[in-house]
Image (cartoon, grey):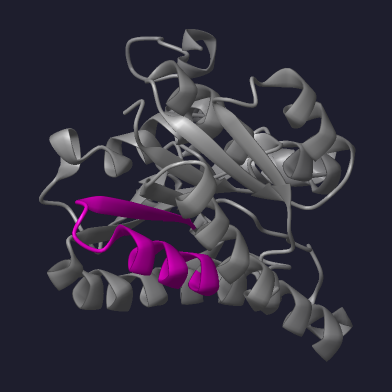
Amino acid sequence: MQDHVLLVTGGASGIGLAVVEAALAEGWRIAIMDLPGPGLEAARNRFDAAAVRCTGIDVSDESAVVAEIAAIEGEFGPLRGAVNSAGIGRDTAVLATTAEQFRRILDINVVGSFVVAREAARAMRGRDGAIVNISSVSGMKGNEGRAAYGASKAAVITMSQVMAVEFATLGVRVNVVAPGPIETPMVRETHTAEAREGWMQVVPMRRYGTPEEIASATLFLVDSSKSGFITGQTLSVDGGFTVAGLASGTSLAVNSEGFDPTRAH
């Protein structure tokens, strides 16, 4: 992959940064798009500029995204993959959510992913390219406090399905990774102790995931040698959250053989 570029939005922290690190280990060159600030500067100082291009961009700024993808193609190398990891979220009750907050979350999470994916597909036409959009289990379940965030992530899933159909003839696959609770800076900032306890009651594996686990799933979907006939799919990486049904708390904590799954990790 040394002659091909993987674009990662939100690549300066959290899941995006984990994708960058894992992709570098596989030999990709990386183009990071993230908001200007300390995180992006840290990434710029950390990585070799010959292998990682860092650009400060708000992904909802269409003209800036269009110009940057053209610059990547002209100055850095041909795109072969794109991962839309940039996103914002709020844990706010419906009655406390303003229209302005709702629009901003949709603008970043949906419109930003749309513009990046659209331009990446144009650049990758005929290259056996792949796009992975990062959604969330909150786009699949009615999680309390996630009206705006959940709506945006549900939109990402449906948008990706449409893109998968339309881009198939271009040779570009589009898939989705839907993380459950993951130990990222945004989650550490927004998940209270009460919220964490709530997740532990509904995640069968009884733990939060890691950014590295999301990165592994993402790169699987980017790599056409491993997932070349997979498109339009949503892969939940959530410790079993989206498939869990009714279960006794005690039977999940300690099974009939006395095995405590929380001690296995």
Q: Where residue 211 sits in the image (x, y, percent)?
A: 57, 31
Which residue is farthest bottom? 99
- Describe residue 126's horizontal placement relative to residue 133 as left or right: left
Residue closest to the eye, 2 or 248: 2
Residue visible at 52% across and 25% down in the picture: 212
The residue shown at (84%, 49%) is 36
Residue 65 placement: quadrant: bottom right
Is residue 248 in the magenta section?
no
Q: Give the range drawn in magenta.
A: 114-134
Quadrant of image for the N terminus: top left
Seen at 24% across and 71% down, the residue is 167
Where 117 sits versus 5, above or below?
Answer: below
Report x, y in % for residue 11.
Answer: 63, 41
Instruction: Name the side, left or right, on which 232 lies relative to 40.
Output: left
Who's the residue at 68% across and 45% down the image? 198
Residue 168: in sight, yes or no?
yes
Q: How many marks?
A: 0
Horizontally, residue 83 falls left or right of residue 189, namely left
Drawn side of residue 65 relative to residue 38, left or right: left
